[in-house]
């Protein structure tokens, strides 16, 4: 699916950008920027091709010949594992006439043959077969120059595979920065790490990618209202600010962020209701500070700008609660539409019956028809529905159309006692959301976005 933004008339001026900046300086955001087609076109040019985007987890590609097909917004990507154990990524497009090469979501193949004219490529992306090649091309065709086009950058960390379309971008580790410390808690807490259970679900919703990313990364405030029914039913067992629970919102570089809700005491089921057999493994793999944070944690949720979010919650039914890690990518399909890709990851060393029950808890909460997922989708679509008319789309802000991000602004300071990296603000604040907007705006208005993305801001 291609984006539904076909190029709007250029009406955004320097004055409009100045007004956006002035609003952000007051912890506000003009509502029209959420769904404006021109803004979306600029994001396509200056943000998505320059940032690291999550593609897959290494556990999805176990054997030589295993492949998955993914998207980096509108760029199709083919990832395949070679006989040398190396995972490679290519533009999923035949070099003959540009046809979308592999239409399957995943599988195992020795070669990939284009359905249009029959050109065939191997695991390394080499062109190894040309239909009627000797007859039609003879020695004229240099097959070595016609292999699949590799992704400019492909890097992995803790089993997560990211791609970047900018060959000059900073390294993935540099881009993630202090987020790596929190990813260690989620992904490197045992020797074997995590594995994907099932296949990624995907579905399309009426929403804007900025809103969905911000919802997970910087908005725990909505849980009290949007997900109230799940709290009352016991599907979501913990509520920040009640019964000895406290929350911190951690602002990180490059628009990343984390929210952590912890208990002030050791809970009866520590380490997020994980099996007791895993607890010694956590303590062996993590630093004492990381292990203590995980031991007291209720929920960890956050995101890597621009399109990856994650949540490590505790969910279940009938009094039983389980932990899983949900990765999700917000693939923009236009200013008003997002395709959600959602993975369920569980500790490899967890008992098999626990994995099955935790997966069911994931499907029932954050799967396509999950309770929390339906709550969120309804709110996201309402924002889009209310943001497409004349009053909101008025760029001159004649109607004072500002979204409010004043929570904690100028009032709440970072907690110096928080043990992890980043700026950790206690309670409900909009600090991460404001940092997301700042990084988004800097990339959007940079004269040379590539230069911005190749250096620390």
Image (spheres, rainbow, N blue to C red):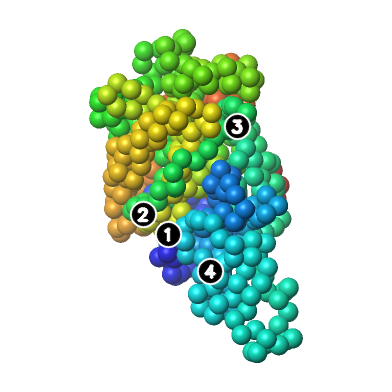
- Mark sitting earlier along the chain (4/3): 4
Query: Can residue 91 be spotted in the picture?
Result: no
Which numbered disc flags the more N-terminal residue, 2 or 4? 4
User: Which circle, 4 or 3, is nearer the viewer?
Assistant: 3
Q: Is the residue under label 3 in contact with that under label 1 (CB below 8 Å)?
A: no
Real-space Cα distance between discs 1 and 3?
Answer: 36 Å
Which is more N-terminal, label 3 or label 1?
Answer: 3
Q: Seen in the image, is 426 located left or right of residue 129?
A: left
**Residue 144 found in image quarter:** bottom right
What residue sits 35% from the left and 35% below the top? 360
For this view, does 264 lie left or right of residue 93?
A: left
Task: Work out how far the residue at label 1 is from the one at label 4, CA to CA, in angstroms.
Answer: 21 Å
Q: Where's residue 176, x and y in %?
A: 63, 40
Q: Are marks 2 and 1 in contact (CB under 8 Å)?
A: yes
In the rendered image of this protein, does residue 340 appear above or below residue 95? above
**Disc 4 designates what residue?**
101
Secondary-structure class at tag 3: loop
- Residue on which the image places disc 2: 204
Q: Sequence order check: which comes first, mark 1 or mark 4?
A: 4
Quick one: quadrant of the C terminus?
top right
Instruction: Give the spatial CA distance, label 2 vs label 1.
Output: 9 Å
Label placed on residue 192:
3
Q: Residue at x 55, y 50 (%)?
A: 55
Residue 295 appears in view: yes
Q: State whether residue 254 is above or below residue 251.
A: below
Label 3 crowd bin: few (<14), some (14–19), many (20+), radius 10 Å: few
Distance between the Cα atoms at labels 2 and 4?
Answer: 23 Å
**Depth order, front residue of 397/33:** 33
Q: Which residue is mark 1?
A: 333
Q: Secondary structure at mark 4?
A: loop
Q: Given contact means CB atoms under 8 Å apart, are the residues at marks 3 and 2 in contact?
A: no
10 Å crowding of disc 1: few (<14), some (14-19), many (20+): many
């Amino acid at each position: 699916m291609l984006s539904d933004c076909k190029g709007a008339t250029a009406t955004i001026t320097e004055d409009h950008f100045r007004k956006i900046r002035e609003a952000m300086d007051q912890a506000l955001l003009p509502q029209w920027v959420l769904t404006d087609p021109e803004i979306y076109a600029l994001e396509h040019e200056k943000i998505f091709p320059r940032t690291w985007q999550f593609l897959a987890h290494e556990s999805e590609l176990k054997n030589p010949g295993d492949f998955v097909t993914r998207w980096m917004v509108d760029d199709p990507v083919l990832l395949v594992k070679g006989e040398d154990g190396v995972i490679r990524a290519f533009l999923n497009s035949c070099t003959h006439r540009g046809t979308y090469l592999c239409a399957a979501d995943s599988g195992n193949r020795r070669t990939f043959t284009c359905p249009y004219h029959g050109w065939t490529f191997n695991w390394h992306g080499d062109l190894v077969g040309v239909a009627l090649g000797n007859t039609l091309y003879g020695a004229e065709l240099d097959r070595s120059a016609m292999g699949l086009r590799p992704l400019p950058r492909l890097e992995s960390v803790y089993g997560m595979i990211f791609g970047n379309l900018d060959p000059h971008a900073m390294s993935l580790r540099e881009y993630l920065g202090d987020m790596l410390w929190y990813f260690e808690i989620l992904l490197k807490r045992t020797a074997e790490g995590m594995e994907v259970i099932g296949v990624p679900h995907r579905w399309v919703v009426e929403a804007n990618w900025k809103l969905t990313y911000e919802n997970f990364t910087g908005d725990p405030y909505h849980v009290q209202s949007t997900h109230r029914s799940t709290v009352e039913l016991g599907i979501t067992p913990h509520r920040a600010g009640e019964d000895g629970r406290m929350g911190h919102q951690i602002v990180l570089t490059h628009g990343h962020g984390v929210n952590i809700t912890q208990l002030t005491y050791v809970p009866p089921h520590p380490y997020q209701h994980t099996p007791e057999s895993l607890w010694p493994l956590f303590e062996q793999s993590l630093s004492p500070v990381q292990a203590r944070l995980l031991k007291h944690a209720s929920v960890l949720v956050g995101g890597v700008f621009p399109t990856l979010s994650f949540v490590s919650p505790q969910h279940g039914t009938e009094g039983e609660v389980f932990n899983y890690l949900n990765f999700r990518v917000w693939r923009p399909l236009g200013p008003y539409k997002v395709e959600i890709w959602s993975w369920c990851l569980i500790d490899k060393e967890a008992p098999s019956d626990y994995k099955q029950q935790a997966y069911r808890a994931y499907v029932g909460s954050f799967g396509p028809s999950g309770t929390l997922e339906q709550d969120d989708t309804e709110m996201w679509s309402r924002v889009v529905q209310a943001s497409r008319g004349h009053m909101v789309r008025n760029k001159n802000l004649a109607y004072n159309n500002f979204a409010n991000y004043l929570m904690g602004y100028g009032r709440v300071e970072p907690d110096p006692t928080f043990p992890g990296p980043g700026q950790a603000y206690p309670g409900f604040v909009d600090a991460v959301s404001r940092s997301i907007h700042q990084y988004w705006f800097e990339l959007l208005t940079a004269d040379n976005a590539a230069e911005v993305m190749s250096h620390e801001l």
